[in-house]
Image (spheres, rainbow, N blue to C red):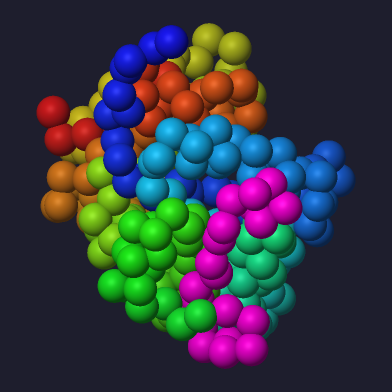
Amino acid sequence: MTTQQPRYQRIMLKLSGEAMAGEQGCGIDPDQAAVLAGKIKTVYDLGIQVSVVIGAGNLWRGNIGVERGMEQATADYMGMIATVMNGLALQDALERAGVPARVQTAITMNQIAEPYIRLRAIRHMEKGRVVIITGGTGNPYFTTDTGAALRGMEVNADVIIKGTQVDGVYDVDPKKNPDAQKFDHLTFAEALRRRVRVMDLTAITLCMDHQLPLIVLNIWDDQNLLKAVMGEPVGTLVSGD
C-alpha cells in the first residue's frame, strides 16, 4: 500500500461543456456524466476537497447568437443558464456514485440550486461535499475559464486542473500539425507571451497575479486526474516559476 500523500488538498476542476456531450457532440449524455463522476470520485475518495466549474458549449455557444445579431449580454446570460443544466446533470451523476454534491449558481435559481456564497462553498468542501459552481461569474463578457480562476481563488484552491481532450499545451494545434511540440511546463509569462489556447488571457492573468498554479491534462486518460493531485508529472503545468 502506497503511503504517498496528495500534493494538493483542495482543487478547482475546470471542465468544458463538451465533456458532458458524449459522441454526439451536443446535449447532455448521462453516461458521459457518469464517467466524469467516476473520475472525480477517485480523488474524492482520497479526501481531496473538490470544486468544479463547468462550461456550456454542449448546449449553447454565445458567439453563434452574436454572429446572427444577438446582443452579447443576452447570449452570455443564456450560456450561464446552460452551465446550471450541466451542473445539475453532474450533481446527479455524483450522487448516484455515492459522492455528495451541491450545485451553486451566480444566477439566482432558488428552486434548483443554492446561490453562490464563498464561505458556504468552502464549508461544503470541508464537510465532504463536491461543490459544482455554475452561472459563470454572474456577469456577461466573461468566460467560464475566468469563472474557474476567480472561484478557484475565492475558495482557496491549491491548483486549477483543466480537463481537456488533449494531453497538455502545445506550441501549435496537435490535431492539425503532427509535429506539434508539447510543453511539460510553462511560466505564466510564457503562456501569455505565446498566447497559448489553454485558458483565456484574463484567466491566466488572474492565476499569475495570485500565484495559483494551473495543470492542463487529458481528463479522459485513465488515472490522469489522480496523478495530477498526487503531484506526478502529467499534462502541462503552468505556474509562476
Q: Which of the 4 image quarters holds residue 42?
A: top right
Asked if residue 231 is positioned above or below residue 188 in the image, the reply reads above
Residue stretch rendered in magenta on the structure: 93-113
Asked if residue 94 is positioned above or below residue 197 in the image, the reply reads below
Is residue 84 something one can see in this rendering?
yes
Q: In this view, does 31 lie to the left or right of 77?
A: right
Q: Which of the 4 image quarters holds residue 239?
A: top left
Was residue 109 drawn as part of the magenta stretch in this picture? yes
Q: Residue at x 55, y 28 (%)?
A: 218
Place of residue 140 in the rendered image (x, y in percent of width and height, measured from the top left): 46, 78
Place of residue 152 in the rendered image (x, y in percent of width and height, measured from the top left): 32, 56
Was residue 95 drawn as part of the magenta stretch in this picture? yes
Q: Which residue lies furthest to the right in this view?
A: 24
Place of residue 146 in the rendered image (x, y in percent of width and height, measured from the top left): 37, 60
Q: Which residue is drawn at 33% across and 15% down?
A: 3
Q: Is residue 158 left or right of residue 65?
A: left
Q: Which residue is drawn at 25% across and 39% down?
A: 213
- Observer-nearest of 142 and 103: 103
